[in-house]
Image (tube, rainbow, N blue to C red):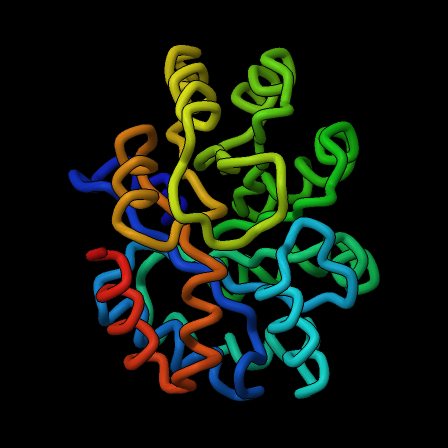
Amino acid sequence: MNRINQLFATTDHKIQSIYFCAGHPTLDGTANTIQALEQAGIDMIEIGIPFSDPMADGPVIQDAATKALRNGMTLHKLFEQLHDIRLTVSIPLLLMGYLNPIYHYGFEAFFKKCRDLGIDGVIIPDLPFQDYLDSVKPLADAYDVRVIMLITPETSDERIRLIDIHTDGFIYMVSSASVTGAQREFNETKQAYFNHIRNMNLRHPRMIGFGISNKQTLESARANASGTIIGSKFVQLLEQHTEPTLAIAALFEALKS
């Protein structure tokens, strides 16, 4: 069974996923960061593939991607760094990146490499859903890699139903229609959105991301989904502390208040 499906099928607590950008703050810190996150009890990790035009990301992750590219991070380099990751890490790992680098690598070569390295899923924010159905899904299915689709408050119910039918793993529920970045609280509009999606009774579990940075946003998201995804806050703390264990400790402290 794919590790993502296994995680949701067997875990009896709210799942915590963390995003970080490969190559940031240092070029060679990818494996160390992954290992530190698993040792700290994180359930699932999203590894960002840096790109020069990350349209869905806010200033923190944009800055991290720019610095990672300057450090020399590429998709080829990332795959090299992940070569032996399954010798030390057992939790689900996903790659999150934009179409351009994956297209240039080659879709089938990309999904084959993911399978060979033990990558369980991918998130491609700018992948059109029809292109996913026509071209990407057959390859992903062949190599047992889950393609996770995002929904936002602007996504129609019809599209959400189609995503629920034609994808596997979980649905990435974006907390707002804006880019990534920390928020102090989720207002009534976002709460209404959470309630609406919950009442749709989708077959797949949902993970809420974008804007989770403190106790209020964490608890609100957990109350409306199977788990949460934290990105910008951890990327920011990793920039400040460099050492992953220190950044993780600082994140856990920030989530208490």
Could you tell me which quadrant the C terminus lies in? bottom left
Could you tell me which quadrant the N terminus lies in? top left
Report x, y in % for residue 191: 40, 25
Tally of numbered tags: 0
Residue 27 in view in this figure: yes
| Residue closer to the observer: 184 or 80 | 184
Kindly indicate the quadrant of the structure image that contains residue 158.
Answer: top right
Kindly indicate the quadrant of the structure image that contains residue 129.
Answer: top right
Residue 88 in view in this figure: no
Q: Residue at x 26, y 49 (%)?
A: 215
| Residue closer to the observer: 213 or 151 | 213
Residue 23 vertical placement versus 166 (above, below)? below
Q: Residue at x 57, y 20 (%)?
A: 160
Q: Residue at x 34, y 43 (%)?
A: 217
| Residue closer to the observer: 48 or 236 | 236
Report x, y in % for residue 222: 28, 37
Residue 178 vertical placement versus 121 (above, below)? above
Going by the image, does 87 lie left or right of 100? left
Report x, y in % for residue 30: 48, 78
